[in-house]
Image (cartoon, rainbow, N blue to C red):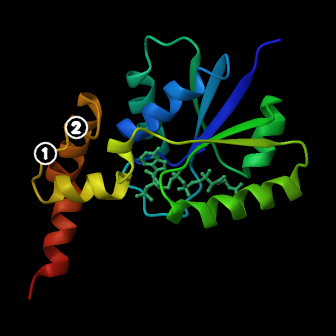
Amino acid sequence: MKKIAVYPGTFDPITYGHIDVVERSLKIVDKIIIAVSGFQRKNFLFSVEERVKLIKEVFKDKKEVEVESFDGLLVDYLKKKNVKIVIRGLRAISDFDYEFQMVLVNRKLMKDIETIFLMPREEFFYISSSIVKEIVKLNGNISCFVPKNVEVALREKIKGGNNAKSEKKTFKK
Ligand code: COA
């Protein structure tokens, strides 16, 4: 029987850290479904459709990687997909409290879920999507943090889009 896992997250946008976690997961499971949460808990830069599209482009040659969005609770999505394995990346001790809370809450909501934590390569330990966005805003080089398609999309969004305008407004005296 094929082992399938769901890797949920917001992926705003996907970074090499996430990609590393996907590649590691594929050593353990046969197929991974990257589930992009559309739930508006954060202020997203990319729409859920844009985030899904960027991830699909990254994994276009990997047939064992599926990419989808989901809206409600993670446990409902898992039930719908009939998947009981969740993958999460664990970068530092600071991730632990939140991840621990999430595992316990999800387990309360659906008792037969197992969460596997994978540690990305050391050079990706300190990356987060927010940091990558900040570097772009400050004209830094992000080519070592995100794939080319994501870099292009970030620059277009941040430099060419409404974000740049609204930031100017905020800081105007
Ligand atoms: N490499 C680099 N960065 C990583 C990373 C890795 N391996 N793993 C996580 N990150 C970063 C992300 O980029 C993100 O950075 P940001 O905050 O700067 O955007 C941050 O760590 C958080 O990661 P993410 O995996 O997106 O977690 P999240 O807390 O935003 O989302 C969900 C977690 C979507 C899985 C969770 O909120 C969820 O299940 N939502 C559905 C609703 C639900 O069921 N709620 C009850 C759950 S308890």
User: Which type of secondary structure does the marked residue at label 1 adopt?
Assistant: loop
Residue 71 lies left or right of residue 43; in this view the side is: right
Residue 103 lies left or right of residue 88; in this view the side is: right
Q: Residue 161: percent from the left, percent from the top? A: 20, 52
Up-down relation of residue 126 to residue 25 (above or below): below
Task: Give the distance between the C-alpha atoms of the residues marked 2 and 1, in whole angstroms.
Answer: 8 Å
User: Residue at the spot x=81%, y=35% of the render?
Assistant: 84
Q: Residue 113: percent from the left, percent from the top? A: 83, 42
Q: Residue 157: percent from the left, percent from the top? A: 24, 48
Q: Nearer the viewer, residue 11 or 158?
A: 11
User: Residue at the spot x=70%, y=30% of the render?
Assistant: 5
Residue hosting label 1:
141
Which of the labelled discs sits on residue 144, or is there none? 2
| Image marks 2 and 1: residues in contact by CB distance under 8 Å | yes
* The image quarter in which residue 26 lies: top right
Q: Residue 112: percent from the left, percent from the top? A: 89, 42
User: Which type of secondary structure does the marked residue at label 2 adopt?
Assistant: loop
Up-down relation of residue 172 to residue 118 (above or below): below
User: Residue at the spot x=79%, y=31% of the render?
Assistant: 83
The amino acid type, in three-letter code, at marker 1 is Asn
Give the position of the N terminus as an image quadrant: top right
User: Residue at the spot x=44%, y=10% of the render?
Assistant: 61
Q: Nearer the viewer, residue 158 or 24?
A: 24
Which of the labelled discs sits on residue 150, or is there none? none
Give the position of the C terminus as an image quadrant: bottom left
Q: Nearer the viewer, residue 68 or 49?
A: 68
The amino acid type, in three-letter code, at marker 2 is Cys
Q: Residues within 10 Å of mark 1 (few under 14, many from 20)?
A: few
